[in-house]
Image: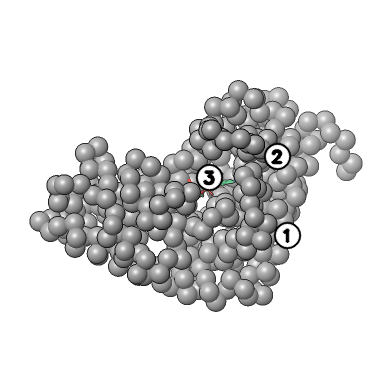
Amino acid sequence: MTRVVSGIKPSGELNIGGYAGALHQFVAMQDQYECLFFVPDLHAITVPQDPKELFRRSKEMAALYIASGVDPRKATLFIQSHVPAHTELGWLMETGAYFGELSRMTQFKEKSDGKEGISAALFTYPALMSADILLYQATHVPVGDDQKQHLELTRNLAERFNKRYGKTFTLPDPIIQTLGSRVMGLDDPAKKMSKSNPNQSSYVLLMDSPDEIRRKFARAVTDSEMRVSYDWDNKPAVSNLIEIYAVFSGETTNVIEGRYEGRGYGEFKKDLAEVVIDKLIPIQQRYREIVDSAELIHVLRDGALRAADVANETLRMAKKAMGLFVIE
Ligand code: TYM
C-alpha cells in the first residue's frame, strides 16, 4: 500500500516555491494513492506568530490546497492541531531523539542563527514532524529539497523506535521531484525563494495580482549572456526561471530552451509571467469562493475525524510498545 502524507506551514502567504516543490505534487498524487494533507499549524508556532494572523492563515492555507486542486473527496485534508495525536506522538518521539542530531538540523541552525529567545519547540520541531508522518504509516512524503534532512531524521527515529520496542512504524521515503524542488529567489539564485526575504520582488505569491507577477519576473536577475539555456552550473538565475516555466506549463526544459533559441531574455520573461498567471488565476478565483465558506469548515471537520481514526490507532500501538499503561 502506498500512503502519502505532507503539509505546508501556515506561517506566511504561500509562494510559488512551496507550490512547485509541494502543493503541485500533492495534486498529482491524489489520483493514484491514498493521501493525507494537513496544515501544520503547530509547526508554525515554533516561532512567534500573531494569533489573529495565524488563525486566518491556517484557514487560508487549507483553502489554497483545495483551490490548487486537492480534492477532499480523494484526499483527507485537515488542520494538524485538530488531531491531538500529533502532539502526543511528538512527545514520544522526542524521548528517542538525541540532542546532537537535533542540533545538526540545518533549518534549526539557519532559523536560530544570531537570534535571541529561540523556543525549545523550534529545536524539537523535527520530532513533531516525524510524528506527523509516522502516525499515518506513510510510505511516501512529497516535499521540496529543504525537507530532505528532516525526512532522514524521521527514518532514523522510526528505525530506532522499531529496534527498541518492536516493529511499530513504516519507514517513509521522501518524494523530491527533479524540477521545482528548489525554487530560488528571483533576486539571487543562491538563496531559496522565501517569504522571509525582505525584498518582495524576490518571490511570487500564489495570490499576487497579474501586474505584480509581471513586474516581479521583469525584474528577475539573469546574466549578461542573453541565452535561454538550462545549465545550473553556469547559468543558475536563468535555469531557475526555466524550471518555474517548466512546472507551470508542464513542458520539458528542452522544449522551453528550443522555443527561446535566438530570442532574448525579455521575451522569455514576459512569456514566463503569462504562463504563471494563466495557472494562478483559476486558483485565485476558486480560493475566493471557498475561503469563507461553510463547505471548507465541513471538509476540515470531516478530514480531522478521518485522520484521527488512523492516528489514534498508531498512537495506541506506540504507547503499548513503550510500556505506557494503556487500558484496552
Ligand atoms: P514548509 O512549510 O517550510 O514548506 C512546505 C513545502 O514547500 C517546500 N518548499 C519549497 N520547494 C521548492 N522551492 C522552494 N523555494 C520551497 N519553499 C518551500 C518545502 O520543501 C515543503 O515541502 N516542516 C515542513 C512542514 C511539515 C511537513 C510535515 C512536511 C510539517 N510536518 C510532515 C511533510 C510531512 C516545513 O516547514 O515546510
Closer to the camera in the image, 30 or 187: 187
Counting residues from the start of the chain, the first of labels 1 and 2 encountered is 2
Q: Secondary structure at mark 3?
A: strand
Give above or below for 151 relative to 74: above
Give the distance between the C-alpha atoms of the residues marked 3 and 1, in whole angstroms.
22 Å
Residue at figure coordinates x 51%, y 68% from the top left: 67
Closer to the camera in the image, 72 or 115: 115
| Left or right, residue 177 beside residue 13 | left
Q: Position of residue 272 (x, y in %)?
A: 28, 62
Q: Position of residue 30 (x, y in %)?
A: 51, 59
| Left or right, residue 176 beside residue 315 | left
Q: Amino acid at mark 1?
A: Leu
Give the distance between the C-alpha atoms of the residues marked 1 and 2, in whole angstroms.
19 Å
Q: Position of residue 302 (x, y in %)?
A: 70, 65
Q: Secondary structure at mark 2?
A: helix
Instruction: For the residues labelled 1 and 2, say whether their Cβ atoms are less than 8 Å apart.
Output: no
- Furthest residue to the right? 327
Q: Amino acid at mark 3?
A: His
Residue beneath disc 1: 305
Residue at figure coordinates x 16%, y 47% from the top left: 224
